[in-house]
Image (cartoon, grey):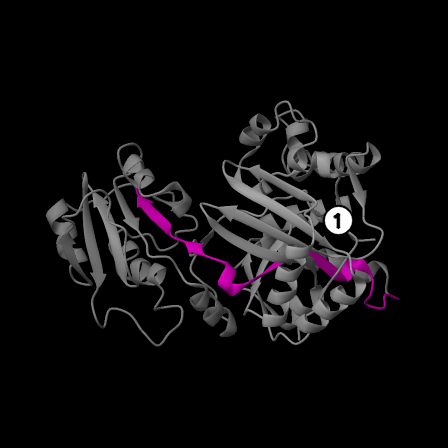
Amino acid sequence: MAVFKSFKAVRPLPEYAEKIAALPYDVMNSEEARGMVEGNPVSFLHVDKAEIDLDPSVNIYDEKVYLKARENLDALSADGYCAQDENPCFYIYRQIMNGRAQTGLVGCAGIDDYINGVIKKHEFTRADKEQDRINHVDYCNANTGPIFLTYRENDFISRTVSSWQESHAPVYDFSSDGDVRNTVWVIDDEKINRAIAEEFAGIDALYIADGHHRCASAVKVGLKRREQFPDFDGSEEFNFFLAVAFPKNELEIMDYNRVIKDLAGFETDEFFEKLSEKFTVSAYEGEGAYRPEKRHCFGMYLDGKWYKLEAKDGSFDEDDPVLRLDVSILQNNCIDPIFGIADPRTDKRIDFVGGIRGLGELEKRCSSDMRIAFAMYPTSLDELMDIADAGRVMPPKSTWFEPKLLSGLFIHKLS
């Protein structure tokens, strides 16, 4: 049974929403963020990447950064840019990109559900990245970036969300990051909010689609507060964290492609010979780039030409939910044994290109700093859920979600 509840969001006044809303902190570096906030003193990047307001010599993990984040967050309300809703609400958050819409509910999930496995994860987290967000949440006394959750669709929730959209005007409606349209409705009817929460209580599992580090960090801050307040009764806001829950049928995973610096010392003919042991390799005769059209097929770009690779029968375990992933097949049959890249998380010879950049970006990289590229068929939501249900984790860089959830539209105070 999943806990997903309404809450009193701190959020922008409508006239400031577009200026405050920002891409999540982890999709750009500090230098890029400084450029993005020029002329916009209320961008939420001043909260999520507060080092941009300090001298570049300051370490991004210095306490000064977290103190500055808290100062900037508090100023948004003190200066009249944000205000907290008087009553707990759910919020409908719809994004439209390239004609495709995804609509989710903004609310708060329970830290106990993460601990007991009702909220399922599919990635490992890094301690250093966790600690950064632990400090950020702790100093700000707030969840500032939503966790991206998904669940198997529920007719009642979908009908309720659709009905509210049709009968109420949105509070925000603006475009960001190119052509992504962001629209928000506030569900301020206590009876409807109670019914939504009761319906979520009948859902067996929520799945983290994106935001594993933010989620783990929010949970650890909640546990820290429990130690500080041992008389807690479970209703305190620090027992919950900010999330947007989307039904599975609203979402789409994009390809997450690979580029590699060299052929690991192999001559081209020798490389193709090694590759042919596990893959059927054929030259692509079509126009433009080859985009894989089904599972277990891969595009390969080398020396100005595209090739189609198809995994041979017996080259992977079709019964194992992790080993049958295309990212696993390529890693285990090519990237590791041929290129010697056993740990793609740390090896500097490999890089990853999100599908949002298009296959042309792979060709571009191969004419600059890389030699060979692999185009992937996207991982599916069913594959993600199967792996999470099995208590397993995906290989690194298995999924790429677009559009990104904006930060700054909803802030969850921990007290």
Which residue position is annotated with label 1? Answer: 142
Quadrant containing the N terminus in the rendered view:
bottom right
Vertical side of 259 occupied by 20: above or below: above
Q: Nearer the viewer, residue 363 or 49?
A: 363
Residue 189 appears left or right of 107: right
Quick check: can you spot residue 44?
no
The residue under the point 42% across, 60% down is 395
Q: Position of residue 203 (x, y in %)?
A: 62, 74
- Image coords of residue 53 (percent x, y): 68, 27
Residues 325 and 77: in front is 77
Q: Position of residue 372 (x, y in %)?
A: 25, 43
Q: Quadrant of residue 104?
A: bottom right
- Which residue corresponds to the image point at 43% horizontal and 51% vertical from the top-left? 345
Q: Residue at x 79, y 34 (%)?
A: 75
Would residue 69 be seen by someone viewing this image from the given angle? Answer: yes
- Nearer to me, 96 or 134: 96
Q: Quadrant of residue 42?
A: top right
Residue that extends furthest to the right in the rendered view of this protein: 231
Place of residue 14 in the rendered image (x, y in percent of width and height, measured from the top left)? 72, 39
Q: Is residue 169 magenta?
A: no
Horizontally, residue 291 falls left or right of residue 254, namely left
Report the span colored magenta.
231-260
Circle 1 Cα neighbour tier, 10 Å, few/some/many (<14 / 14–19 / ≥20): many
> What is the secondary structure assignment of the residue under circle 1?
strand
Kind of residue at badge 1: Ala
Residue reaching furthest to the front: 167
- Give the residue displayed 75% in from the left and 49% down from the top: 142
Vertical comparison of 278 with 71: above or below: below
- The vertical placement of 358 against 215, above or below, is above
